[in-house]
Image (tube, coloured by chain):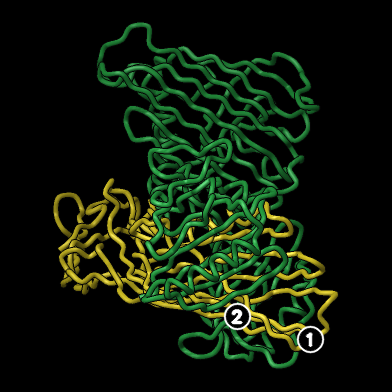
Chain colours: A green, B yellow
Amino acid sequence: MKNNPRSRSHRIALLLLAIFLLACTCPVPFFPSSLPIEGNGPEKISFRSSPDLLTDPTTGLASLKSYHVSFHQDVTGSLDGQPFERHTHIELTRASGQSDFVRELQGTDESASYFRAITTNQAVYRWNTLDESCQGEVGELLSGETLEPAELLLPILQTSKVGTETVNQIPLVHYHFDQNALPLTEPKPSVTGEIWLAEQGGYLVKYSLNAAKPAETTGAGLEAAQSWTYELSQINAVESVTLPAGCMAVPVDIPVMPDATDVSRSSGMMEYSTASSIFDVVDFYYHNLDSPGWTTTQKEPTGELKVPLGLSFSKGDERLSINIDQADAGGLEINIVLYNPKEQALATTPTTTTPEGTSTPAVPQPTIDPSMSGLPADVPLYPGATNLTNLGGQGISFDAPDLPDQVAAFYHQQMAAAGWSPINEAKSGTIIIQIWKKEGLMVSLQIDVKDGKTNVLLMLTNTQ
Amino acid sequence: VGIFLPDEFRPVSISGTRTVTYIADKEGKEDIFAVAWIGKSSDAVAKAPFNIKLCTYWYKLYAELDMNVEVEGLAYSVRYTVESYGTLKAPDPSKPLNVEGNGKKVRLNAVVTSWNSSKCTLFTWEPGTGGGSVDARAYPSPNGKGMVLELAPPQLAWDVAYSFACDGHGMTLAGVYPITSGSDPWISATFPQGGGQQSIKLDMFEIPMNQLNGAPGISVSYTATVKLEKEPPK
């Protein structure tokens, strides 16, 4: 699951490809001193420093509190006479020690790949596909797992000043360059490019490079046009990196009991074991969640406490559940769940199950033939039931034409007459619940009022 | 019994370290030979044996449903949790990635997490518990990417109830939820990277949530997660 080797190889491959491909637009490559050497990383090139040159495209970035970078590289042409394309897209946001890195690759020479890594102060979250749940864990990025896009840019050794401009309220100096500004061997491909450097700080804000496909192609090697764009934005304007919806934070700020063992933290979850008493655990969390900002309206449980026990805390829309239970190996098992019910609801598409081959009626239908209910012969469907919905073979729901008390009385009489034993019957507000058992089968009835109608949820459970 | 990736590399200095990946097809013993070459002749040879053992996988299902009810001056919250975990081992050494574990415990709890009533001066409650067993297995994804974790329909007694009393008058509420949507397996999750953590839909919570949400005074939310990892957590 660690993707360090893959990411590192991608990084090296990107850098190699960037230089190699650019060099390949001319018949005789190229500029060997810019090649990275395995084990030592890319070799640094030192040039005479000048305000009008871009000898190190990463200059000045370290002094910025926050920024966002977008990098695109498109290579289109032919490889040994066959169509060739390679598209690289990188987005990077840095803010206060946090980062959000996204890399997408696609081309004719390899399958498309996606990688995203977000680092917060103490946790790292990874995605290896677009539709994957985030994989969060305590820790830091692995060496070489991400890169600074500016490291991919070729140094510019010779420029002509175009003028000064202000972009995004940042005063910039605009330069133009061509193939003679690049560290390439002769004959060089035709290149046009521009850079914009911040007047104060000297950091690179924009970079564009376009290399033309060779005018005369030979059908040998790579003969391709290239387009590179790099843009720095939101300079010192990003407060923090935020996790995408549905990716819950690793609860790094939730304390654990001093004697905690087997502590595990992942996205939205934390678990550990403790030999402490349930009273100590409850007391600990009621006195140690204030500083992370968690509050509860629930009074601290006192007296004789029993497991399982659940505690609830909240912070804004987020909910923190602390569930205490007996551990299999003795002691207590603590499971802590962090989630946002609002995000959860947005991420969850309501499921409506209808009998196969039918559609949900827009208006209440006439009485349904009881044979369509799918119920056992000894479980009656309420007379006059409408809007019958099959819940995937586990039960049904329907609307009844009478009041909940009448429906409950009907089932009380009918189920007993059919030999069912009552397990439980309860009423809370408008909800009436009945549970019946017979020969390894359990029937639960939940009778309630929904949208002004009496709705019945009848579930069947096999208990054998 | 396996392969090294890469099986050869060229260092750029006379000393240093290099990490290689070894992928075994089966259990057994393996020798690693290291040969240092200068030009066309070997300069040094080393041999180190090591044992190859089958990986043990570990899974965990943890789900929680929170239901908040406000009716007739009574407000309370109930939490249902479902938990199952265990190790998965390969019964056939020739198929080390086809792992399984049968009869793993499933635990269902129902607890009252908050209570507020103007009518009751005394409230006591007893947690509800239920449980059973489930068969779990994991195997390589048919598309060749990652692993699939499956849990069979559990064998359970889901007669979970929680009880409370107001002014000494006891009352019990029971919730029986559908375990599945009729499908086998009960839970299936694909891990493209061979393991990790995923949020899943759990029908036994999803269906009642959709049924109950929107009812006057009731709000329900839930979260469900499965994990699949190599080796038990330390």
Q: Are marks 1 and 2 on the same chain?
A: no
Badge 2: residue crowd in 10 Å (few <14, some 14–19, many ≥20): many
Q: Quadrant of residue A297?
A: bottom right
Report x, y in % for residue B89. 28, 72
Q: Residue at x 36, y 76 (%)?
A: A439
**Badge 2 sits on which subunit?**
A
Badge 1: residue crowd in 10 Å (few <14, some 14–19, many ≥20): few
Dot 2 amino acid type: Ile
Mark pair 1, 2: CA separation: 27 Å
Residue furthest to the top in view is A215
Dot 1 amino acid type: Asp
The N terminus of chain A: image quadrant: bottom left
The residue at which mark 1 appears reads as B167
The residue at which mark 2 appears reads as A324
Report x, y in % for residue A336. 60, 71
The C terminus of chain A: image quadrant: bottom left
Q: Is residue A79 visible?
A: yes
Q: Residue at x 38, y 42 (%)?
A: A356
Foreground pick, A348 / A103: A348
**Left or right, residue A399 beside residue B26:** right
Foreground pick, A168 / A432: A432
